[in-house]
Amino acid sequence: MAPGWVDTDMAAEYLHGAGGAAVRAQSPLNRVASAEEIAATVLWLATEAPAFATGAIVDVNGASYLRSWRGRGWRPRISMNAAGPGLRRTPTAR
C-alpha cells in the first residue's frame, strides 16, 4: 500500500503549518487522508475481497498520484512482457 499524506501526530506540525496548504492544493480532494481512511484500506486488503489482486500497489492518496506523473517525462503504458501485461514507465517523445 502506498499512502499519500496522512494527518497524524508525526505530520501535524507540517500539515497544520505553512506547508499544509500547498499539500492540500496538490490533491484533487483538497485534503489529506485521516488515519482511519488508511486503516479502512488495510482492513479491506486483509479480507477475501481483493483475492485476485497480486503484486499490486494500492495507492491511497486522494488521486494526488494521478497529478504527480503529468509533465515528468513519462506516461503510463500497457506493455506485454514475459510476466504478462503490466504498467511500465515509458519516456514521452518531446
Image: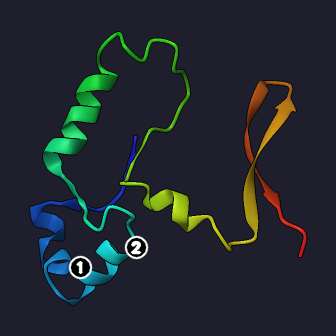
Residue type highlighted by circle 2:
Gln
What numbered label is drawn on residue 56? none
Residue at 13% x, 71% y: name it.
12
The local secondary structure at tag 1 comes to: helix
How far from the left and from the top, in percent, is residue 24?
A: 30, 73
Quadrant assignment, res 8 = bottom left
Quadrant assignment, res 1 = top left
Residue at 24% x, 43% y: name it.
38
Considering depth in this image, is 44 or 83 the residue closer to the camera? Answer: 44
The local secondary structure at tag 2 comes to: loop
Disc 2 designates what residue? Answer: 26
Establish if 49 lies above or below 40: above
Considering depth in this image, is 84 or 30 the residue closer to the camera? Answer: 30
Disc 1 vs disc 2: which is toward the camera? 2
How far from the left and from the top, in percent, is residue 56?
A: 53, 31
Residue type highlighted by circle 1:
Gly
Disc 1 designates what residue? Answer: 20
User: Which quarter of the rendering shows the C terminus?
Assistant: bottom right
How far apart are labels 1 and 2 at the CA level? 10 Å
Q: Residue furthest left?
A: 9
How far from the left and from the top, in percent, is residue 16?
A: 13, 79
Considering depth in this image, is 9 or 22 the residue closer to the camera? Answer: 22
| Residue neighbourhood size for the residue with mark 1, other residues' Cα within 10 Å, grouped as few (<14), some (14–19), many (≥20) | some
